[in-house]
Image (cartoon, rainbow, N blue to C red):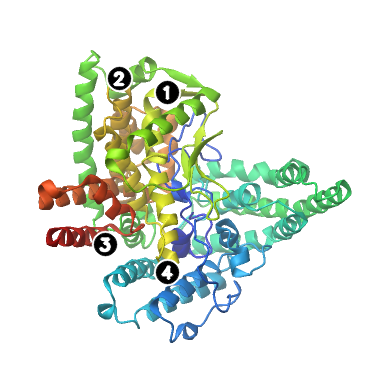
Amino acid sequence: MIGKRFSFTLLMGLLLLLVACGGMENAAPSVTPAGVDVREVPTEEVAAATAVPTPTSSPAQPVSPTATPAASQWDGLSLEEFFNQSYYALLLRSPQLVTEAGLVQAFETDNNRLNNLSDDYIRETQALETAVLDQLHTYDRDSLPPDQQLSYDIYEWYLTDLVAGHEFMYNDYPVSFFITSVHQDTLQFFTDIHPITNKQDVEDYIARLSQVGDQFAQLIDGLQRREEAGVVLPRWAINWTMGGINDIARNSPQRTPFYTTLEMKMMPLSSITPEDQAALLAEAEEVIGTAVIPAYQALADTLTAQRAIATDEDGIWKFPNGEAYYNYLLRHYSTTDMTADDIHQLGLQEVERIQAETAVLFAELGYPADESLPELMARVARDGGTLYGDDIVAEYEAIISEAEQNVGPAFDLRPQADVIVIGVPYGGYYVRPAVDGSRPGAFYATYQGSEAVYGMATLAYHEAVPGHHFQLAIMQELQGLPSFRNGISFTAYTEGWALYAEQLAYELGFYEGDAYGNIGRLQAELFRAVRLVVDTGIHTQGWTFDEAVDYMMANTGYPRGMVEGQIARYIVWPGQAVAYKIGMMEILAQRQKAQDALGDAFDLREFHNVVLANGSMPLEILSQVVDEYIRMKGEG
């Protein structure tokens, strides 16, 4: 996720994704106005590890995360060897990512270091990215067989995008209220990611705790460099952010999640004696008090100082190079050359189309034609029913189980890994299965409070079956590909597939007899279309926070609390939200192209194999893959 930043662009590629950025659709800010229900957490960007397959062969010389490998080490390698070794070199720049991916043993690295966020280290990483791209260009693409040409093209696009992002290294918000923030990533790394299975794990955990002060000092230096470049969070966003930071900064060591998590995870370990557990907890308490809490206090002080100079201007148009930065982000996330104006107009057109479809269903239900969309959706939420607590998890399990039984007409390629539902306070996202098979895929569902039934099926299809679980688990299980193709995800492809899966479920008859659920599907698609309008409106047309909130409420029917959380997300994470709808529409366009070209010879399962069996890729390359499939099918 972006918040795990040791290099802005590298992490947008590498760290975005074990969790499928999918429906989100529910990542909650650490502090938001009462009643916020964020509905969607980008799967790829959520907190679990970026899934990277166990190396088919370890790097010949595992690279220290503190040293920049020389490009010359790859001279004379076959292309496949270069793919793997250069990709491993990029991964090794992030010790935390290596831990998340479960590659510590494979890479023979230590498991006791945090990511280096220093300016020098980021620039070293950028130099490595450039060197990898330059080395790739030493291979003659035209002489390669088709499968290697495809790998070459995907890797080249990915690396070119990384290098293009170097220009904007001070343009992002590494600290905010959203899940992309470094301070939230740090907390999640210790509470959810770092393993605690034996005494060595605990010692590594404490060693990493002792480095939080240094890491946050590097982070603060980065914030100050951004301030000098004219990049400071909006004032209201700083206020939202301060709550989560002060939760740590103003607490005692034993009351922080860093301590309570260690205590909880270590307690069941019979391999560590009670005496040793007590001693280790005492050591952790001291380190939290001397390194972690002061780091959060220093971060709070920095944000307090920046609040004094912050403005309430929301869009990145306010940055000195804001227009160029936003153009970069649109290409990065959409993997197309669509302009902000193109995307804005597409959003307006799709909003009108989807609302017309929804109006037909409202009429069929006998709802008043003169009511506003928010009023009509409130009726749907009430009439469609509500579930609470454990019943929410049980319902999601039933929806996914039924979907697995009924996707046969559309799929003959399915993931080997299972998918389970886990209830959490703030859910709505998917996490890939463990590479070693020790953990199934998981859909994390919000189970606290209540859940309107009408939207549940669509979220389950998006996050699990046939959405993120099918795409991401299958990608991870693909054999015979360079490792980067099992690990790297492109947002428009990943989120586009999951949104496409929602419509596919409708086409397969999953909503038959469920008018409320079908309205939920259309509302979810409408939500993604509205994003095209508000994201571009905020960042290129000067829309204010309130203007964007009013537009989204009026055109989706979602309540103010949720909408405010969403608009806040787009402000601190510009461009990402446009990828969902653009990706979905491109997959549909490629399917239509294949149907038109092949006629009766078109097979839906075969088309899905083409899309899924090649792993994630930029949309412009997906179009080329489908063209080749049509050509080969026609010749056959």
User: In this view of the protein, which residue sits in the foreground, 471 or 582?
Assistant: 471
* Contact? badges 4 and 2 (CB < 8 Å): no
Q: Is residue 497 visible?
A: yes
* Contact? badges 4 and 1 (CB < 8 Å): no
Q: Which mark is residue 452?
A: 1
Disc 2 secondary structure class: helix
Image location of residue 46, percent across then percent down:
49, 47
Residue depth check, mark 3 versus mark 1: number of the one nearer the observer: 3
Q: Which mark is residue 376?
A: 2
Disc 3 secondary structure class: helix
Q: CA distance from mark 2 to mark 1?
A: 14 Å
Q: Taking 531 as reference, is 34 left or right?
A: right
Q: CA distance from mark 4 to mark 3?
A: 23 Å
Q: Of label 4 and label 1, which has the lower sequence position?
A: 4
Tell me which corner region of the image, top left, top right, bottom left or bottom right, holds residue 217.
bottom right
Disc 4 secondary structure class: helix
Residue depth check, mark 4 versus mark 1: number of the one nearer the observer: 1
* Contact? badges 2 and 1 (CB < 8 Å): no
Image location of residue 253, percent across then percent down:
76, 46
Q: Which mark is residue 166?
A: 4
Residue drawn at the location 48% of the way across and 31% of the way down: 36
- Amino acid type, residue under disc 4 in the picture: His
- Amino acid type, residue under disc 2 in the picture: Leu
Q: Is residue 505 above or below residue 258?
A: above
- Amino acid type, residue under disc 3 in the picture: Ile
Image location of residue 493, percent across then percent down:
33, 52
Residue depth check, mark 2 versus mark 1: number of the one nearer the observer: 1
User: In this view of the protein, which residue sits in the foreground, 214 or 93?
Assistant: 93
Image location of residue 425, percent across then percent down:
56, 33
